[in-house]
Amino acid sequence: MKKKLKHVLIFCIGVLITGIILFVHIKYSFSENLLQKGRKNVSNKFMPEVTDAIAMDGEIIVLCRDGTVWKWDYISGMEGAVRVSGLEGILKLAATGTAVYALSEDGYIYAWGSNSEWSISPEEKRDKIYYEPVPLMGLNNIVDMGAKNGTAFAVDDSGELFVWGLYLYGDEWKDRIPGFPEDRKGEVKGVQKIFAGADGYHYFMKEDGMVFSIMESPGADTLICDFIFPELDGENKKTDHPRFLDEIEYIDLREGTKYAVTVLYELGTGKDIVEMDADGYTVFMYRADHTLWYWDSNTIKYHDFKDAMAEPESGRENYAGNFEQINVREILGTGDGEEIIPEIKDICAGKENAFFLTEDGQVFMSEYVTHEVKDVEYYNVSDTRKDRVMDTSMLPDMHLKKMSFRKLDLEHIVCINTDGGSSFLAVGEDGKCYLYDLNEDLG
């Protein structure tokens, strides 16, 4: 009897141990399956679809379709994405280079980052860091904004334009307060769209379709002004070419600054313009008829040395130019048949290059290439000595430039952006980010 009880006890213990092992195995397997499922979906289980993105200071900052803003650093990647607190209903992102701006649907601009350029608050010290978004003071009911390289613009629901970061006033701190010269507010009334450029050329469209630019050229009046004066076709077309600065109608916006020449110039009516952006040499324009254009002038030809724009005979800078259509079909390689050319969804310009995003997720870029090398004689406006012998100078073996385009090996891209310099960011449908530094990646 005792032996029988012993066998029963051993059997029960074995069943119990087997049950425990089986339970642990099932529980572990179930948990591991959940873990693997979570790993597979970690990139989209919490963050909505990305519609825009900015790369700055080692971080990727993205705007999602539901109006939320998220960020992650280069090292952790999207797996480490966290939501930026305090931001909801965001419509647009922009960056000055040191600070990030977010425009909300209730008309406020929120900013965070470094105040080194007084881009967040001119009343605070430049070394202050804003880790959480704060509203920019003095701005409300804002409907559009734009910013690049320390310069920013905003327009409210009445069409009033605010600028900050341009050289306008004698007191530099005043340049950092959103506003516009009082005597010139009538010239910019009724702004509807803002296209902030990367290096001195910024474009705006009014409700009546009039397009104007605000341009800033560093230095004094005696030096070459790094300006371009595009003309839109139509009734408002101005004088014939060639055109010199003293023949061009523009408005000097300066109120005491000694650091730059800042002017306002009207291009003409362009109601059919969908997108615009500008690098340091030209402006790109995409029209409603699905054609893409750039302004061809001496700022491109004399890309490497703009002082050569001054003609040796007259000493005046020649700003003549014309719009040239870009052959998108050839760039994308869609052939000469009846294939539909995809529309341009976005133009994103840095100082030397621009990225173009098509509606089907392709990307191509612009660049300046040498097409001729020759000796160039120019009027030396920088030599103002009374005892100078020669009015002109010779630049041997100057590389004359032209515009060129090439398609990038990217597909299914949903948004592009730039730091305003040489770095560009592209984000794919799968959330993957592609960072380009054109000084390194593309030669």
Image (cartoon, grey):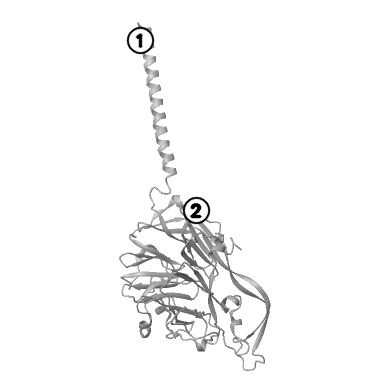
In the structure shown, which secondary structural element does the residue marked by tag 1 occupy? Answer: helix
Q: Mark 2 or mark 1, which has the lower sequence index?
A: 1
Q: Where residue 235 sits in the image (x, y, percent)?
A: 43, 82
Q: Residue furthest bottom?
A: 386
Quarter holding residue 175:
bottom left
Please indicate, yes or no, whether residue 123 appears anywhere in the rendered image: no
Q: Which disc number belongs to residue 5?
A: 1
Badge count: 2
Cα distance between the residues tagged 2 and 1: 64 Å
Please indicate, yes or no, whether residue 320 appears anywhere in the rendered image: yes
Q: Residues within 10 Å of mark 1 (few under 14, many from 20)?
A: few
Q: Where residue 90 sits in the image (x, y, percent)?
A: 35, 62
**Quarter containing the N terminus:** top left
Question: Residue at the spot x=68%, y=75% of the render?
Answer: 373
Q: Can you say whether 72 is above or below 369 in the image?
A: above
Q: Residue furthest top?
A: 1
* The one of 150 and 13 positioned closer to us in this rendering: 150
- The type of residue carrying mark 1 is Leu
* The one of 111 and 62 positioned closer to us in this rendering: 62
Q: Which disc number belongs to residue 107?
A: none
Q: Which disc number belongs to residue 75?
A: 2
Q: Residues within 10 Å of mark 2 (few under 14, many from 20)?
A: few
**Quarter containing the C terminus:** bottom right
Q: Can you say whether 1 is above or below 21 in the image?
A: above
In the picture provided, is 183 more to the left or to the right than 292? Answer: left
- The type of residue carrying mark 2 is Ile
Q: Where residue 260 sits in the image (x, y, percent)?
A: 49, 82
Quarter holding residue 271:
bottom left
Q: Where residue 328 sits in the image (x, y, percent)?
A: 53, 64
